[in-house]
Image (tube, grey):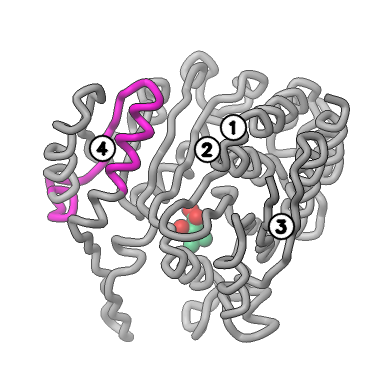
């Protein structure tokens, strides 16, 4: 294949983990005989600083003209501490999701065997956990009408049936390819949007007789996820709930630095870690690059290159086995590795296959 990749490294640890993922992708393309071209573009606080816009038109154009986007992270403390800021880095991410029609965010949550004892949850509890959270990404409260005055604020949580149908369709299809068990997570006992989700799922389920559907309130799902994570196969939920539940999901894996995701929709697909810009670690060469590297595996899998995806996953597993790990997941008493050391080890592994 011939890949044209837009690289949006963004802020904080973004550029450091992006560099490792780009190098990994280059190595895999070399081994597998693909051509790849990377083009950098500005996003987030870096883009605000440079051109005053967190998702500038040039970046949008590059994204639209590329086969895929490798996105890292946005966010900067100087904006977090200033609720009155006119423009925020996160707006770049939201604008990008909306403008590129990236309505489906696929977030796999799994336990890694070598890290079972790294999770704050008991090992026997997380062993065998392997599910996908499908988060709606361009609707709900994130994008509903906002009112913000000195003494009042509101965020409207709105979904059209069409928006619900298209995300549920993706969830049913994923379930079909896996263990055929779909959990629809909502708050239908309280929220009108939750009832729309539930009714729509019930209607659609007749078209997927091979998929078993269960309905779960989000508060209950938050509890079940850590009490019995292996229960789930495919979970689908609205934007805000999906944001919250997937950070919780990272506890199952052992670190937020391990979870990757794919954002899919109408235009160019985007691959990203689920974590943020981790500004405290910026420039220290300590950030875990695995979530970003695993997002490259998801990229290959999306383009029907399962062997290339598997090679990356194998290399990541081998690095975990060999204790080539950053501080967030290093075994007790073992010296943690730097971001670049982990990246280089994985590239070396790939080149030796
Ligand atoms: C995520 C992030 C974003 C979100 C932030 C950075 C706006 O937390 O991708 O999960 O809330 O969607
Ligand atoms: Mn989040």
Residue at (41% x, 29% y) in the render: 226
Horizontally, residue 148 falls left or right of residue 50, namely left
Q: Is residue 118 above or below residue 39?
A: above
What span is in magenta? 167-195
Mark number displayed over residue 254: 1
Q: CA distance from mark 2 to mark 4?
A: 20 Å
Residue at 79% of width from left, 25% of height from top?
323
Answer left or right for 188 relative to 332: left
Can residue 123 be seen at all in this image of the molecule? Answer: yes
- Calculate the distance from the C-alpha at mark 1 to the C-alpha at mark 2: 6 Å
Q: Residue at coordinates 19% horizontally, 25% vertically from top-left?
A: 209
Q: Which mark is residue 184?
A: 4
Frontmost of labels 4 and 1 is 4
Q: CA distance from mark 4 to mark 1?
A: 25 Å
Residue 132 at x, y = what percent? 43, 34
Label 4: element kind:
strand
Mark 3 and mark 2 lie on one chain; the one further toward the N terminus is 3
- Give the quadrant of the N terminus: top right
Distance of label 3 from label 1 (alpha carbons): 19 Å
Q: Earlier in the sequence, mark 2 or mark 4?
A: 4
Residues at discs 1 and 2 in contact (Cβ within 8 Å): yes
Residue 250 is tagged as: 2
Residue 156, percent from left and from top: 24, 68
Location of the C terminus by quadrant is top right
Q: Quadrant of residue 134?
A: top left
Asked if residue 172 is among those painted magenta in the image, a careful observer would answer: yes
Q: Kindly identify which residue carries mark 3.
A: 13
């Amino acid at each position: 294949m011939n890949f044209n990749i837009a690289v949006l490294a963004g802020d904080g640890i973004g550029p450091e983990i992006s560099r490792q993922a780009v190098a990994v992708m280059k190595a895999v393309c070399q081994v597998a005989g693909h051509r790849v071209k990377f083009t950098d573009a500005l996003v987030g606080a870096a883009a605000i600083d440079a051109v005053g816009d967190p998702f500038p038109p040039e970046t949008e154009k590059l994204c639209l003209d590329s086969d895929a986007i490798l996105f890292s992270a946005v966010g900067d403390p100087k904006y977090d501490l200033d609720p009155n800021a006119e423009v925020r880095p996160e707006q770049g991410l939201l604008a990008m999701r909306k403008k590129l029609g990236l309505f489906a965010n696929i977030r796999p949550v799994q336990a890694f065997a070598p890290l079972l004892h790294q999770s704050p949850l008991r090992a026997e509890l997380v062993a065998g956990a392997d599910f996908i959270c499908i988060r709606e990404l361009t609707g709900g409260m994130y994008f509903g009408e906002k009112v913000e005055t000195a003494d009042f604020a509101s965020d409207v949580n709105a979904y059209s049936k069409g928006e619900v149908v298209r995300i549920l369709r993706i969830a049913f299809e994923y379930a079909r390819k896996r263990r055929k068990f779909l959990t629809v997570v909502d708050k239908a006992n309280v929220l009108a949007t939750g009832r729309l989700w539930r009714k729509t799922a019930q209607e659609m389920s007749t078209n997927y007789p091979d998929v078993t559907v269960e309905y779960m309130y989000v508060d209950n799902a938050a509890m079940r996820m850590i009490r019995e994570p292996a229960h789930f196969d495919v979970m689908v939920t609205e934007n805000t709930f999906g944001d919250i539940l997937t950070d919780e999901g990272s506890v199952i894996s052992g670190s937020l630095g391990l979870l990757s995701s794919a954002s899919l929709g109408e235009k160019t697909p985007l691959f990203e870690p689920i974590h943020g810009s981790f500004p405290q670690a910026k420039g220290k060469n300590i950030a875990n690059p695995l979530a970003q590297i695993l997002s490259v595996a998801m990229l290959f899998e999306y383009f029907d290159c399962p062997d290339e995806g598997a090679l990356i996953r194998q290399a990541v597993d081998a690095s975990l086995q060999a204790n080539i790990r950053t501080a967030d997941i290093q075994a007790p008493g073992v010296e943690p590795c730097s971001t670049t050391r982990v990246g280089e080890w994985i590239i070396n592994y790939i080149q030796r296959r």
